[in-house]
Image (cartoon, rainbow, N blue to C red):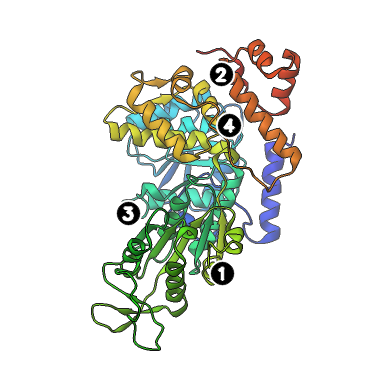
Amino acid sequence: MPTWHSQDARLHARERAAGKIMSSNTTTLRASAALASPPETHDAPALPGAVLFVPAVSRERAAVRERLGRMGASVTTVVSVTDALRLLGTRPFALCLVDLADDRQALPAIRLVRTQHPHVPIAAIVDPSHPLVAGEALHYGAVDLLPWPFEARDLATLLTNTVDRQPSPRSQDPDALLFAHSAPMRLVAEAVRRAADSSGCVCLCGEPGTGRERIAKAIHSASARASHAFVSVDCAGVGPDDLERRLFGQAIERRQTPRGSGVERVGREGAIYAARGGTLYLANVHHAPARVQARIARVLRDAEVVLAETRETIDIDVRVMASADGALEKAVADGHLREDLYDRLVAIRIDVPPLRRRREDVPLLAVHFLRRASAAAGVPTKSVSRSAMALLSALPWPGNARDLRSLMETLAETVPAPVIQLEDVLAHASLDGGAAPIDTGVTLRDARARFEHDCISAVLIKHHGRVGDAAKALGIQRTNLYRKVRQLNVARSLLATRR
């Protein structure tokens, strides 16, 4: 295992050799300037004020001070949370940065700082391999997460988030917040940055409930169109005439446009007109009737329409983003999606992973949904025990984040205690989750391992961690079950009895 100093030396060498930062491990990503194109180190925004750094006893991280200093920040390091609270009471700091390597000691520090100095932004240095700690940090009051090992670009994003935390419609939009603690979602976050700097149409492919509209809002909020409208229309389950009225302000008639012009006619009540200058998001575009798809394709082709109320031809500047399931090419082959519309929509394609492929994000999402559900229910915000959070991370979630949000809303309303325990989740969660969609992009060996992981996790949960009962239900010996748990990286907390 390389030491921290050797890791940092390699990072420095890579930066010098490349002349710029090549990759990012950004965790919680706000849809603001943080989603802009990756800054080079010398272009990183300077932090307006001092940084208070609370390091971990078990791991020295002098590079945090060094790199923050290179970005124009004045860094003050303390040895304890007592010193941190004393300094916060004597002079202003723009950011308090807490290292969570010693999570049991550092997490209460976040709570103390948040309680006594609620206006000071708190960021936490977290290991992506410990998502439960990251979730707890957000619950205790951290507003940003910095992954370990970090690169200069991650610090630039953190500083940008801090600057943008000043009141602003873009930075305060909770529906444009991405949780990208897992490797698959960090790739999505990179794609969001690139799409925000582009003007092309975007197609978001993934299962229902994976947050495709949230990603579209993140792109919109980080783009030059952020000051204009984001208009969403779901193309599924709507009749052709109703969908046309929603999009175009009126249903089609045989000859509505001037003879030979071919230009589409729209009304001021339609979503296309409402989204001019901004973004039109078409959910489940492959479910739209063929004639509606043809009209959308013509609007994208011509970039002009005939305004129904005045009959004048006007330019229509609308960026279209659309969502569809993963079998987009099959939808074209089967005739469910017009090829001309498909060609325009996939200028940028982002594949959104299901929640079962990004389990590291579950604790962060659970905390986020629980906060919002508690506020909506008018009850104090609850916390989640580690054993309960381990269970949430192990469940299959066939409905993805939509199912997780629904469960957290139920728990916020029904659990009277301030801490949600394992038995509370067991009482309300569906352990099998039904049949999950088949992922055709993996090998048979990987698919078998994933199935065994989910199956063993569900059986252990069902039998409340009793290994003997779980092994009997699975038809294997206890020793073989322990071996499978190690090989498949099943959450060890599931082996414990309820507490």
- As measured in the structure, the alpha-carbon distance from the residue carrying label 1 to the one carrying label 3 is 40 Å
Q: Are marks 1 and 4 in contact (CB under 8 Å)?
A: no
SS at mark 4 in the image = loop
Mark earlier in primary sequence (2, 3)? 3
Mark earlier in primary sequence (1, 4)? 4
Location of mark 2 (residue): 462
Numbered disc in front, either 1 or 3 = 1
Disc 3 marks which amino acid? Answer: Ser
Give the number of the disc on residue 168.
3
- As measured in the structure, the alpha-carbon distance from the residue carrying label 1 to the one carrying label 4 is 44 Å
Q: Are marks 1 and 3 in contact (CB under 8 Å)?
A: no
Give the number of the disc on residue 339.
1
What is the residue that sits farthest to the bottom in this orientation?
A: 260
- As measured in the structure, the alpha-carbon distance from the residue carrying label 2 to the one carrying label 3 is 46 Å
SS at mark 3 in the image = loop
Q: Residue at x 49, y 39 (%)?
A: 399
Expressed as whole percent of the image width and height from the top left, the position of residue 465 reads 59, 15
Expressed as whole percent of the image width and height from the top left, the position of residue 422 reads 48, 19
Q: Residue at x 67, y 34 (%)?
A: 450
Give left or right: position of 322 versus 482: left
Image height check: is 496 above or below 405?
above
Give the number of the disc on residue 130.
4
Decide: few, some or many residues near mark 3? Use Cα within 10 Å; few <14, some 14-19, many ≥20. Answer: few
Disc 4 marks which amino acid? Answer: His
SS at mark 2 in the image = helix
Disc 1 marks which amino acid? Answer: Glu
Residue 80 seen: no
Q: Residue at x 72, y 41 (%)?
A: 6
